[in-house]
Amino acid sequence: MLRNRADRSSLACLIVSASCQVAWLATGKLVLLLPMFLILRWTALVQHNHSHLSLFRRRWPNRLADLALGPVTGMPMELYREAHARVHHPHAGTPQDWTQPTEVRNGIALQERPLSRLRYISVFVPRAWGLGWASVRQDLAQTKRLLAEGAVMAALVVMPFMTGSPLRLLPIALQWVVVAVVSAAANYRHHDGYLEADQPTDFANDTFSLLYTRLGFNIGYHVAHHRRPNAHWAKLPDLWAKADAAPRQRV
């Protein structure tokens, strides 16, 4: 059912994250917080990969994955897909990419006004929610998907109140803040300093540390990822090796 056998690890991350999250809210057992936070970065990367190339071959399991990823990462899948797959990649290095580390006015990136890392981290998620929603709501099918994902997240928030333990929401809120900060910081690292790239697809920095390659779904091969955004993450090292020009690298 999976598109690629390598995604067994991706599916495991999602199952463990979602299961532990629901179990924590239902029972309050502290031991459940450990796996929730240990694999949070990887689950966020699963959302990234799923936005480009869905995990499954069939529609219904992909929809279930969409519904599960939002509560874990704090970002509904439809908003993430809009910001990353429909805005960032097709328009990388252009004023239409409002996800890049610059100031934005009326949905247009002001490339002559780059942002500092801290400033970018503070605006990354609000932009995705605000500008993403403004775009998604123009399409009925996308709006329905987003509302369904929002309903699942709302149910998750209501659960601890129904069990009389609203403080159990604090680790969930912390999860969402961690994902927001780490994702924004990583995006800044991947794209800082390349507003004047020779090619829009090269609006990226490669990072070859173990955490960004074998232990990070190969997200460090970022130039190759931009050249072939819908290529499966397991193929990125080969695509990088076959590139005509040596990719830019940031250690």
Image (cartoon, rainbow, N blue to C red):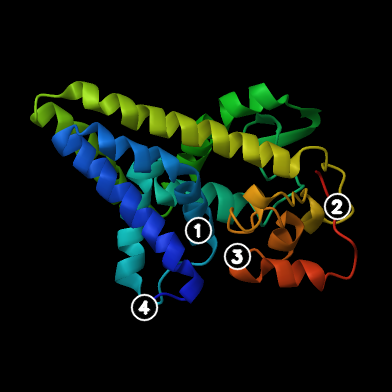
Residue at 14% from the left image edge and 36% from the top image edge:
27
Q: Label 3, secondary structure: give it.
A: helix
Front residue (pair 125, 222): 222
Q: Label 2, secondary structure: give it.
A: loop
Measure how far apart labels 2 and 3 are at the Cα level.
19 Å
- Which of the two labelled residues, at mark 1 and mark 4, occupies the earlier sequence position? 4
The residue that mark 1 highlights is 51
Of badges 1 and 3, nearer the viewer stands: 3
Q: How crowded is mark 1: few (under 14 residues within 10 Å), some or many (20 or more)?
A: many
The residue that mark 3 highlights is 233
Of badges 2 and 1, nearer the viewer stands: 2
Measure how far apart labels 1 and 4 are at the Cα level.
17 Å
- Which of the two labelled residues, at mark 4 and mark 2, occupies the earlier sequence position? 4
- Which of the two labelled residues, at mark 2 and mark 3, occupies the earlier sequence position? 3
Q: Label 4, secondary structure: give it.
A: loop
Image quadrant where one finds the N terminus: bottom left
Q: Residues within 10 Å of mark 4 (few under 14, many from 20)?
A: few
The residue that mark 4 highlights is 1
* Quarter of the rendering containing residue 34: top left
Q: Residues within 10 Å of mark 2 (few under 14, many from 20)?
A: some
Residue at 34% from the left image edge and 72% from the top image edge:
59
Q: What residue type is labelled 2?
A: Arg
Q: Label 1, secondary structure: give it.
A: helix
**Outermost residue, left side:** 163
Residue at 71% from the left image edge and 67% from the top image edge:
237
Measure how far apart labels 4 and 3 are at the Cα level.
18 Å
Q: Which amino acid does label 4 sit on?
A: Met
User: Residue 11: image x %, image y %?
Assistant: 39, 62
Query: Looking at the image, can residue 70 be seen?
Result: yes
The residue that mark 2 highlights is 248
